[in-house]
Image (spheres, helix red, strand yellow):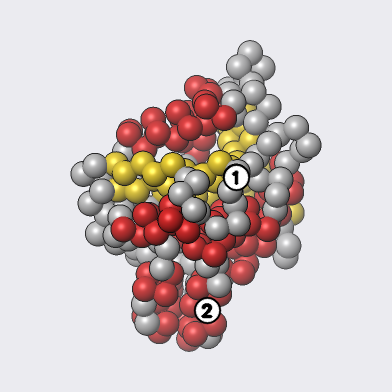
Amino acid sequence: MALDATWIEGPDRPIEVKVATPSSANATGRLIVLTHGLPLNRGGGVLASRLLPELAERIAGEVGWTAVVPSLRGVGETGGTFSARGWLDDLRSVIGAFIDPSSMPSLAGFGLGGALCLKVASEDERIRGVVTMATPADLSAWCGRPDRFASICELAGVIEDASTVSSERLVAEVEALDPLGSIATIPPRHLMIVHGGDDAVVPVAQARQLVEAAGGHAELRVVQGAGHWLRPDPRMVATLLGWLERRS
């Protein structure tokens, strides 16, 4: 198993990507793209995607999938400024760079990254499965007031200066991801919704709304006692690895 850092050509700038490749002995030929969320803590834009390469290595080493971790614009070393439309364009570019006819790709995303994955899968039938983790169903409530949302994005470092962007447009583009509308179009392709039972940022009821919007054609895994930050939780990792193994 190898973890490599590379760059791919994005729609208007290079995109930083980490790729975990399984050894030839256990390679399944399958592909998953792991998508970070929108960091809302001070300086989080630098760190958001750095938490995922270790998970990518687990996936490559234990279930034999190639795992790709992009840093979308404004995150990590990738330049530019966050916008939901820009992140969609970046994610589509990453998928296009790594997909092949036999890879049967899946997407997995944390928080807002899950909403991105649902939106992309709703538009691209090549995506065979989606996993969301702590993903909000109601993005309007999640964003809150546009001016405050823009200020938080500036504090996180994913936009340089909130005064130079339209906060109303910033929020409108996030809302347009429409997780409930997107997930409704994905079945019978595979879906799994993972959520912390004690998530104080996105109530677990929103995970159930996503399942309902999918017509019940989605696995729901509630991690009891877990909060919003699922990435460090070994139960989340085991749940994801098990789902991938069943798709191999």
Cα–Cα span, label 2 and label 1: 29 Å
Q: Which mark is residue 173?
A: none
Question: Viewer-proximal residue, 174 or 80?
Answer: 174
Q: Residue at x 48, y 77 (%)?
A: 171
Which residue in the structure is indicated by mark 1?
188
Question: Viewer-proximal residue, 62 or 128?
Answer: 128
User: Pointer 1: residues within 10 angstroms few (<14), some, or many (20+)?
Assistant: few
Q: Residue at x 50, y 46 (%)?
A: 217
Answer whether residue 116 is visible to the viewer in this image. no
Circle 2 SS class:
helix
Q: Quadrant of residue 120?
A: bottom right
Answer whether residue 221 is visible to the viewer in this image. yes
Circle 1 SS class:
loop
The quadrant of the rendering that contains the C terminus is top right
Residue type at mark 1: give it: Pro
Q: Position of residue 189 (x, y in %)?
A: 60, 43
Q: Position of residue 138 (x, y in %)?
A: 41, 68
Q: Residue at x 40, y 33 (%)?
A: 239
User: Pointer 2: residues within 10 angstroms few (<14), some, or many (20+)?
Assistant: some
Q: Residue at x 52, y 27 (%)?
A: 246
Is residue 163 found left or right of 18 in the rendered image? left
Q: Position of residue 121 (x, y in %)?
A: 63, 53
Residue type at mark 2: give it: Ala
Residue 59, above or below 221: above
Q: Quadrant of residue 68?
A: top right
The quadrant of the rendering that contains the N terminus is top right
Q: Position of residue 96 (x, y in %)?
A: 74, 49
Question: Viewer-proximal residue, 17 or 147?
Answer: 147
Which residue in the structure is indicated by mark 2?
172
Mark 2 near mark 1, Cβ–Cβ under 8 Å? no
Count all numbered tags in the image, as a single digit.
2
Which residue is most to the top? 25
